[in-house]
Amino acid sequence: MKIGIVSDTHRNIEYLRTVTDFLVNRQKIVALYHLGDDYDDVKELEELYLEIVQVPGIYDSRYKSGKLAAKALETILGLNILLVHSFEKDAVEDDIVRSDIILYGHTHHYEMRLEDGRLYMNPGHLKGPLEKNMPPTFGLLTIMDREVIATIYSMQFKPVQTLELLRSEGGLYKAT
């Protein structure tokens, strides 16, 4: 199962559409996870009939008022995936302990790391050509019965970073 991961689109609908087109038509994703800022950007994708799971950014008034949940938990092929915008503000210890994959945004810097059998992934941003000295990037998760492949892509659709992980009862670990 392939899932597209985007964050921090900040009303850049052109980049969001370009990335979604690549993810849907070339990667054949079945779902798109949007990690906030701006929550309403995905309304532009309604005609795709694509499953979209999203969380709001911390500056969204509906986040601040509690009208929108700050986090979402999805289970895909037995893996628990936590979605938050700000890892520091929204991921509590109970969330982390029960999650195999933690997806977050907010910093506009892509990052992937494996820690204590968990994958932490920030896909970066799609705000513009350069934001906080970082080019725009997005992510792709490929979840299979025995392995997970996480990739960060540039806007030229070239992999920037890839982690190939194996699944076990004790969590995820790097394939050798």
Image: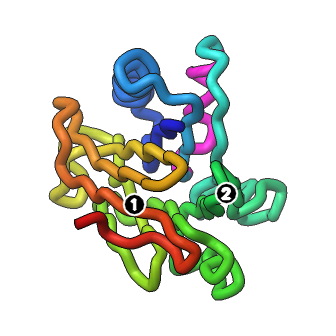
Who is closer to the viewer here, 77 or 55? Answer: 77
Q: Quadrant of residue 147?
A: bottom left
Q: Is residue 37 above or below residue 27?
A: below
Q: Is residue 3 left or right of residue 158?
A: right
Q: How many marks?
A: 2
Instruction: Residue 35: give x, y in percent of width and height.
Output: 54, 52
Local SS, label 1: strand
Task: Check disc 2: other Cα within 10 Å, few if <14, some if 14-19, many if 20+.
Answer: few
Residue at image coords 80%, 63%: 65
Residue at image coords 42%, 30%: 16
Viewport quadrant of the C terminus: bottom left
Q: Main secondary structure of the magenta part?
A: helix
Instruction: Residue 76: give x, y in percent of width and height.
Output: 64, 50
Residue at label 2? 78
Q: Is residue 101 left or right of residue 90?
A: left
Q: Is residue 134 above or below residue 19?
A: below
Q: Is residue 84 magenta?
A: no
Give the residue type that dot 2 points to.
Gly
Q: Nearer the viewer, mark 1 or mark 2?
A: 2
Task: Check disc 1: other Cα within 10 Å, few if <14, some if 14-19, many if 20+.
Answer: many
Which of the marked residues, 1 or 2, is nearer the chain's N terminus? Answer: 2
> What range is drawn magenta here?
36-46
Q: Is residue 149 left or right of residue 60?
A: left
Local SS, label 2: loop
Q: Which numbered tag is attached to residue 122? A: 1
Q: Is residue 43 magenta?
A: yes
Q: Is residue 165 above or below residue 4?
A: below
Instruction: Residue 46: give x, y in percent of width and height.
Output: 65, 19
Q: Is residue 139 above or below residue 164?
A: above
Residue at image coords 22%, 31%: 157
Instruction: Residue 102: give x, y in percent of width and height.
Output: 52, 66
Give the residue type that dot 1 points to.
Asn
